[in-house]
Image: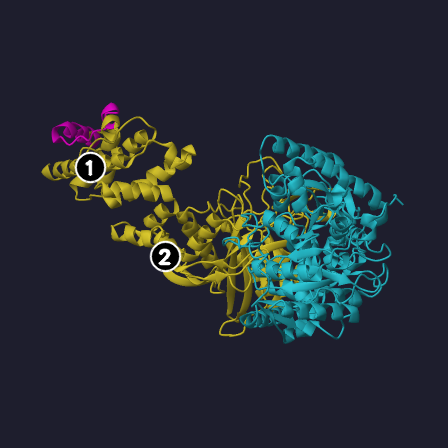
């Protein structure tokens, strides 16, 4: 019999409603999976077993009373630890927030609670979501369930590892430059970054406000759609939240790609992409063409400058967003003889090296005399890139590429080389700069048995097209492998 | 002897009286216990986001419109970055290159001379919290500890920046005073200097008369009354002139006005080279003001103080009285209502700016704390007009009405103040006074009419102001001539 922790959200939902098992049993299975895998993975920073069981009991009571709050009722989920949870420590992976217990919930958390979801815990991340490996967490790295000597990607590595291994049925992360899609790719999951403004950022601890967006991790495309549908919508508390009618997400899942126009993003293929990743993606382009899509290559020259622009804009915004961590009101405080000294010492001790690097980078990019050459220029590139995307979407319905240039790399391999770490997001960050939706779908394993991700990008608010192609990619890939750690009998290390 | 010219621009910060703060739903309540009107947004907790307050934006637009500004269609919010313990985000949301309102003006009148001061811009900001430093000086540098109150954090602030069109301390004072009147007339702030709901900072430089190039400016802060603004500007102008004439050089700095010593002194120059690293606030979208909103704002403007003064002067009162009335809005309202009822403008203006102002000051009450109503003024003016009351007695009647004793008719009767216009009744009083002062009578008889005022005064005194002075005067003349 399948372990309940390995069920998809859709099939778990069926089981819960047909009375095959309770949310309490499902939640216990997931907590048990966490108990045996956490010592290998460190996917969670906080496991809230008590809260999860209480939520499961409430869901079961609702089921018994005939109250159905939607497809997530009774489903155990994980949340990246940069979204605030009332009464539950929230750290953003940083020492500077260690021990901080928020007095309020992120809008996403409120929505999940309202939908009857069971929140299992808070997952590990690169400090303040800055990183591509989850090695920048102040609380130690998360490991990849496919190979625990390798990184799960980042920054939402904890959420990815948890869903991959079964210590959650689905999870939410945040994606500023690829922080959902890249770990999804490295962990063999579906990961979606929706259109900017689709999901409220209220309660999401900001890294780069104009780029940050919350999105789901799931083991299949349908579950990803279900998770996303539960959290989208205008929020009065987020001024950048999309005010229009929430666009369709899942109605085209079974439509196939016949007659669709699909563009291969030329700047993100070939050079710089690992041969096995490149080959797997090319094979998928062919399959999509065979399935009736019109597939051709398209060039977006500005995509070649996206990485440089991103590493000016994101740090610039971060330099202001992280200014509030000063030891005055909450979090870490290191005493000093003067207020300035207290603030400086607090920040020097509270932030890790990558965060400090980006704050310095961003402060510099905004400084008088440098603004025009750096931040100003980067904004121009961003505008250019948006225009190029818009022009491309006049010709094609979606764009495709690899999600990550490589499969999971070894722990420690890139920690001394920030630029090679930054390069991990080269395929994903153009969509953040454009504000467009984008997702990663697993399409196979490389020779080392590590998952390869395929990226689908769509115009803003065209989530339905994104999911339509993603579902077809999923069917064509027939990727049904699970990581060894999820399927073998493991004992806590 | 060189002629010097001062060039002055004033930056004004006005605290808006909105129900809630600029970017969150917290109440604006200055009397509240420290740190009770706060929330995740104005405490800058991780993950909190700002949402603009429409009432505050509306207030700023009304101020801009009152100065005849252009209301910008899509204005931008920026982050102004600096670290300070009472600034919880360690950046302030402000406006930078595209503010809400631009290119306005304020006309002021200094001793009859009309001067136009350009308004560069009117933009939105948020206030900081308050620091209380645990030291004898109240300053941070020698404090053992500091306490922070974030109730004020995020309260809407408007910054009004003038062009450097001001030339004298008197103009600076009148600009500030007229600005207060305009903002007060809009009902968006009480603009009280003493309570800090308005603050004026003056940028001052001097140059030799005729020079085109501006001198180096100093910014002077901490003036807590219009008088101290005028004094500070005057002092700073003389300081700069003296400095230059003695071979020194003005440095660009912020200077602190000290009320007690009547001098300005350089503040710590730490902030001089501060780089605020402004960039567009990514948590907010551009603020769109469409045509219909713009039209609504202009249509909603009340009669502004300058127009009101002009109208009052046209109704027959003098400029000074009009200014006094408009300065205190409730007096102006009472004046307008009384005139609408048909009372004589000059008479009413005289009472309001004389007896009424004096009464309010003497009893330390607001007009609303008295019983004086427009109908009373109309009735009183009527009684003087038809001779029922002398103008002297009318002032007494006004006092009793202010004190709440009743209508003018009632108090005049109760206090027996109705004018004696009966020659027979006054004749004996005049005779008595002349009999007691034979020297006066002699002078009058010899054609020296100077003492007539004395006699009238004595009769008025004897009748407790009820005598009709004209009638008394006529009686004296006839007695002096007749004998």
Look at 54% across and 50% down and name the residue there. A234
Residue identified by numbered label 1:
B382
**Residue B422 colored in magenta in the image:** yes
Give the camera-side residue of A453 and B335.
A453
Q: Are marks 1 and 2 in contact (CB under 8 Å)?
A: no
Magenta includes A218?
no
Question: Which residue bears the numbered disc 2?
Answer: B295
Q: Which residues are magenta?
A: B412-434
Q: Give the percent coordinates (x, y) of residue B22.
A: 53, 48
Which one is earlier in the sequence, the residue at label 1 or at label 2?
A: 2
For the residues beneath circles 1 and 2, the answer to whether they share a chain is yes
Residue B231: x %, y % from top left: 52, 54
Instruction: Looking at the picture, tell me which residue is in the foreground, A439 or A295.
Output: A295
Q: Which chain is yellow?
A: B
The chain assigned the colour cyan in the figure is A
Does residue B467 lie above or below A415 as drawn? above
Sort mark 2 into few (<14), some (14-19) or many (20+) by Cα contacts within 10 Å.
Answer: few
State the image quarter where residue B346 is shown.
top left
Q: Callout 1: residue from which chain? A: B
User: Going by the picture, which residue comes out furthest to the right?
Assistant: A493
């Amino acid at each position: 019999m399948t372990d309940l922790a390995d069920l998809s959200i859709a099939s778990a939902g069926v089981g819960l409603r047909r009375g095959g098992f309770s949310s309490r049993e499902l939640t216990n299975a997931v907590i048990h999976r966490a108990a045996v895998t956490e010592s290998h993975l460190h996917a969670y920073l906080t496991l809230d077993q008590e809260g999860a069981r209480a939520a499961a009991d409430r869901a079961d009571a609702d089921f018994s009373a005939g109250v159905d709050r939607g497809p997530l009722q009774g489903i155990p989920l994980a949340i990246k630890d940069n979204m605030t949870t009332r009464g539950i420590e929230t750290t953003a992976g940083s020492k500077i927030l260690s021990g901080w217990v928020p007095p309020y919930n992120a809008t996403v958390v409120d929505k999940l609670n309202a939908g009857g979801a069971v929140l299992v815990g808070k997952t590990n991340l690169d400090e303040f979501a800055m990183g591509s490996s989850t090695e920048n967490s102040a609380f130690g790295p998360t490991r990849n369930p496919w190979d625990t000597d390798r990184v799960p990607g980042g920054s939402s590595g904890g959420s990815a590892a948890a869903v991959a291994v079964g210590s959650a049925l689905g999870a939410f992360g945040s994606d500023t430059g690829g922080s959902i899609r890249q770990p999804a790719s490295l962990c063999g999951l579906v990961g979606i970054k929706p259109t900017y403004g689709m999901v409220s950022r209220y309660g999401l601890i900001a890294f780069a406000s104009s780029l940050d967006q919350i999105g789901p991790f799931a083991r299949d495309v349908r579950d990803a759609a279900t998770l996303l549908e539960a959290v989208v919508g205008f929020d009065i508390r987020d001024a950048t939240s999309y005010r229009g009618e929430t666009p369709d997400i899942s109605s085209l899942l079974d439509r196939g790609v016949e007659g669709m126009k699909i563009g291969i993003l030329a700047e993100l293929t070939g050079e710089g992409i690992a041969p096995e990743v490149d080959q797997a993606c090319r094979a998928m382009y062919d399959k999509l063409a065979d399935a009736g899509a019109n597939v051709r290559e398209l060039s977006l020259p500005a995509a070649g400058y996206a990485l440089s622009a991103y590493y000016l804009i994101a740090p610039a915004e971060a330099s202001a967003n992280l200014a509030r961590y000063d030891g005055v009101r909450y979090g870490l405080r290191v005493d000093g003889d003067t207020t300035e000294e207290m603030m400086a010492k607090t920040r020097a001790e509270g932030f890790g090296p990558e965060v400090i690097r980006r704050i310095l980078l961003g402060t510099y990019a905004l400084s008088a005399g440098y603004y025009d050459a750096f931040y100003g220029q980067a904004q121009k590139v961003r505008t250019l890139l948006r225009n190029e995307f818009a022009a491309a979407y006049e010709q094609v319905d979606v764009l495709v590429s690899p999600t990550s240039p490589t499969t999971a790399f070894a722990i420690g391999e890139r920690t001394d080389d920030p630029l090679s770490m930054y390069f991990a997001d080269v395929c994903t960050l153009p969509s953040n700069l454009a504000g467009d939706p984008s997702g990663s779908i697993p399409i196979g394993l490389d020779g080392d048995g590590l998952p390869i991700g395929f990226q689908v990008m769509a115009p803003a608010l065209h989530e339905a097209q994104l999911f339509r192609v993603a579902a077809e990619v999923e069917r064509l890939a027939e990727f049904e492998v699970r990581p060894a750690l999820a399927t073998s009998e493991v004992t806590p290390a | 002897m060189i002629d010097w010219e001062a060039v002055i621009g004033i930056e004004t910060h006005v605290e808006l009286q909105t129900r809630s703060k600029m970017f969150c739903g917290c109440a604006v309540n200055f009397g509240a216990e420290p740190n009770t009107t706060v929330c995740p947004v104005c405490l800058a907790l991780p993950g909190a986001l700002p949402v603009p307050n429409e009432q505050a934006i509306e207030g700023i637009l009304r101020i801009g419109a009152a100065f005849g500004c252009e209301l910008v269609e899509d204005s931008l919010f920026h982050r102004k970055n600096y670290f300070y313990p009472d600034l919880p985000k360690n950046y302030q949301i402000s406006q930078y290159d595209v503010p809400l309102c631009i290119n306005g003006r304020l006309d002021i009148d200094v001793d009859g001379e009309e001067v136009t001061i350009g308004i560069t811009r009117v933009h939105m900001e948020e206030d900081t919290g308050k620091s209380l430093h645990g030291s004898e000086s109240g300053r941070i540098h020698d404090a053992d500890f500091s306490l922070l109150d974030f109730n004020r954090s995020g309260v809407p602030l408007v910054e009004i920046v003038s062009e450097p069109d001001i030339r004298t301390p008197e103009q600076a004072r009148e600009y500030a005073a007229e600005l207060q009147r305009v903002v007060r007339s809009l009902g968006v702030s009480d603009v009280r200097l003493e309570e800090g709901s308005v603050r004026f900072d003056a940028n001052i430089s001097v140059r030799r008369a005729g020079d085109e190039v501006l001198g180096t400016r100093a910014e002077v802060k901490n003036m807590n009354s219009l008088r101290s603004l005028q004094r500070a500007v005057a002092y700073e102008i003389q300081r700069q002139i003296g400095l230059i004439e003695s071979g020194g050089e003005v440095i660009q700095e912020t200077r602190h006005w000290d009320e007690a010593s009547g001098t300005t002194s350089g503040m710590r120059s730490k902030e001089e080279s501060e780089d605020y690293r402004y960039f567009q606030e990514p948590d907010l979208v551009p603020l769109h003001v469409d045509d219909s909103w713009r039209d609504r704002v202009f249509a909603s403007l009340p009669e502004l103080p300058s127009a009101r003064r002009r109208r009052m002067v046209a109704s027959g009162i003098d400029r000074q009285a009009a200014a006094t009335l408009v300065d205190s809005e409730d007096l102006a309202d009472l004046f307008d209502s009384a005139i609408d009822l048909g009372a004589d403008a000059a008479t009413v203006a005289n009472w309001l700016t004389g007896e009424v102002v004096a009464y309010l000051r003497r009893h330390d009450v607001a007009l609303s704390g008295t019983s004086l109503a427009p109908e009373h003024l109309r009735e009183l003016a009527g009684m003087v007009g038809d001779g029922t009351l002398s103008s002297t007695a009318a002032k007494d009647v006004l006092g009793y009405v202010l004190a709440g004793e009743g209508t003018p008719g009632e108090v005049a009767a109760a206090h027996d103040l109705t004018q004696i216009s009966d020659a027979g009744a006054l004749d004996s009083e005049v005779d008595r006074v002349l009999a007691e002062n034979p020297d006066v009578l002699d002078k009058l008889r010899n054609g020296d009419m100077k003492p007539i005022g004395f006699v009238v005064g004595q009769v008025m005194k004897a009748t407790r102001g009820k005598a009709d002075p004209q009638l008394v005067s006529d009686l004296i003349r006839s007695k002096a001539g007749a004998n």
